[in-house]
Amino acid sequence: MLFFECLPVELIADVLGELDLESLVKVAHLSKRLYAIASDSSLNPWRRPILRNLCSQCYEPSLKNLSVYSAVPRQNWIEILALAHPEFILYAATLPNLKGIEWEECFNRRFLPGWRKWKKDGFWKEAYLKSVVDLAQERAF
């Protein structure tokens, strides 16, 4: 009898990438091996379900709390923060602890270079959130 965990890690990561986010969170905590595969940033089975959510613009409830799971590589948050609706970022998502350089990358991927004026002397996280608030206000009108 062949067990799922005996398969090559690349194949397991491929299968995990087909799951919805809630199922992936659960499966990632079933064993040490599945956790290691799910948290490996080079395999990154989270990318496909996250992109499916962002492209569908109908976010699964699990997306808003992904930052609390250590199995989710931080690089996924750069994509989420670059592509998600401003309202989701401001009012629903639990924001991750990212380094300043990661917030700068989020900012650069989401906004035009002219928006860098919001940075001034503060931190990139503040500049990013200020710009998202402005974007949300523009969309409201």
Image: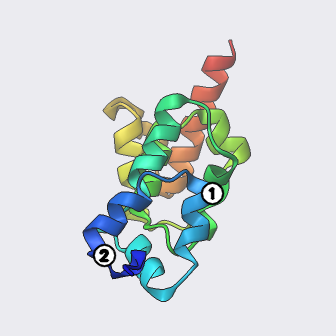
Q: Which mark is residue 63?
A: none
Q: Is residue 96 in view from this perspective?
A: no
Given residues 120 and 12, the one toward you in this image is 12
Which amino acid type is shown beneath numbered disc 2? Leu
In the displayed structure, would residue 46 be above or below residue 115? below
In the rendered structure, the answer to whether residue 134 lies left or right of residue 114 reads right
Q: How is the image coloured?
A: rainbow
| Among the two numbered marks 2 and 1 on one chain, the one whose residue lies closer to the N terminus | 2
Dot 2: few (<14), some (14–19), or many (≥20) neighbours within 10 Å?
few
Given residues 70 and 82, the one toward you in this image is 70
Residue under the point 59% across and 59% down: 23
In the displayed structure, would residue 40 be above or below residue 91? below
Dot 1: few (<14), some (14–19), or many (≥20) neighbours within 10 Å?
some
Q: Which mark is residue 22?
A: 1
Q: Which residue lies most toward the front here?
A: 1
Q: Which residue lies most toward the right here?
A: 91
Q: Quadrant of residue 51?
A: top left
Residue 35 screen position, x and y as percent: 47, 79
Residue under the point 48% across and 65% down: 98
> Are dots 2 and 1 in contact, CB under 8 Å?
no
Q: Quadrant of residue 132?
A: top right
Of circles 2 and 1, the one toward us is 2
Where, quadrant-wise, is the C terminus in this rendering? Answer: top right
Residue under the point 63% across and 28% down: 136
Q: Which mark is residue 7?
A: 2
Disc 2 and disc 1: Cα gap in Å? 22 Å
Residue 50 screen position, x and y as percent: 48, 47
Which amino acid type is shown beneath numbered disc 1? Glu
Residue 19 screen position, x and y as percent: 50, 53
Dot 1 falls on a residue whose secondary structure is helix
